[in-house]
């Protein structure tokens, strides 16, 4: 059993979190990437949720394999034939995996036992494939 879908839009990396202490002494974690990341994760979550319903996918509670093919906008003068530049691939992956958890593709992204991720040039977005392992 597998599910495949495509999300168009400019992929955003999920960076580190920053911790702040409130005046009441409580720690608050804030995502360093801000609003663009929130919008990207929301887009991925909504599309994944729609595809779950459309493809009659049931939330998985076991091991899964994930393939993520990120497409990045090509700069006017690329230095390399593939986007060997920021954003970091691992941070792009983190944002999408967290969005897939929110969408209910699986119970937790710790269930991912096999991960393949690539960055290429093309119409910005990501193609997502999740397979039971």
Image: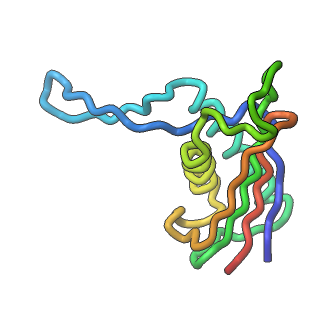
Q: In the orientation shown, which residue stands out farthest toward the top? A: 76
Q: 89 or 111, which is in the foreground?
A: 89
Location of residue 12 in the rendering, given as x and y in whole percent from the top left corner: 63, 34
3 versus 71 height, above or below: below
Residue 19 left/right relative to 14: left
Measured as percent of width and height from the top left, residue 7 is found at 79, 43
Seen at 56% across and 48% down, the residue is: 90
Image quadrant assignment for residue 42: top right
At 28% across and 33% down in the image, what residue appears?
A: 19
Q: Is residue 35 above or below residue 105?
A: above
State the count of labels: 0
Say which residue appears at 81% left-offset and 38% top-offset: 81
On-image quarter of the N terminus: bottom right
Give the residue displayed 67% in from the left and 39% down from the top. 84
Note whether residue 49 is visible.
no
The image position of residue 111, as x and y in percent, is: 54, 71
Q: Quadrant of the C terminus?
A: bottom right
Evaluate whether residue 130 shows in this view: yes
Side of 7 relative to 66 (left or right): right
Up-down relation of residue 49 to residue 2 (above or below): above
Quarter occupied by residue 101: bottom right
**Relative to the observer, which residue lies in front, 59 or 13?**
13
In the rendered structure, the answer to whether residue 39 lies left or right of residue 80 reads left
Q: How is the image coloured?
A: rainbow
Quadrant of res 9: top right
């Amino acid at each position: 059993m597998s599910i495949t879908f495509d999300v168009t839009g400019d992929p955003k990396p999920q960076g580190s979190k920053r911790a702040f202490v409130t005046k009441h002494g409580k720690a608050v974690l804030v995502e360093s990437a801000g609003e663009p990341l929130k919008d990207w994760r929301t887009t991925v979550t909504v599309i994944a949720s729609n595809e779950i319903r459309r493809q009659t996918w049931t939330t998985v509670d076991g091991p899964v394999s994930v393939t993520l093919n990120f497409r990045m906008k090509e700069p006017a003068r690329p230095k390399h034939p593939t986007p060997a530049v920021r954003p970091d691939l691992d941070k792009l992956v983190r944002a999408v995996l967290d969005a897939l958890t929110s969408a209910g593709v699986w119970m937790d992204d710790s269930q991912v036992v096999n991960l393949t991720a690539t960055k290429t040039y093309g119409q910005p977005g990501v193609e997502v494939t999740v397979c039971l392992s």
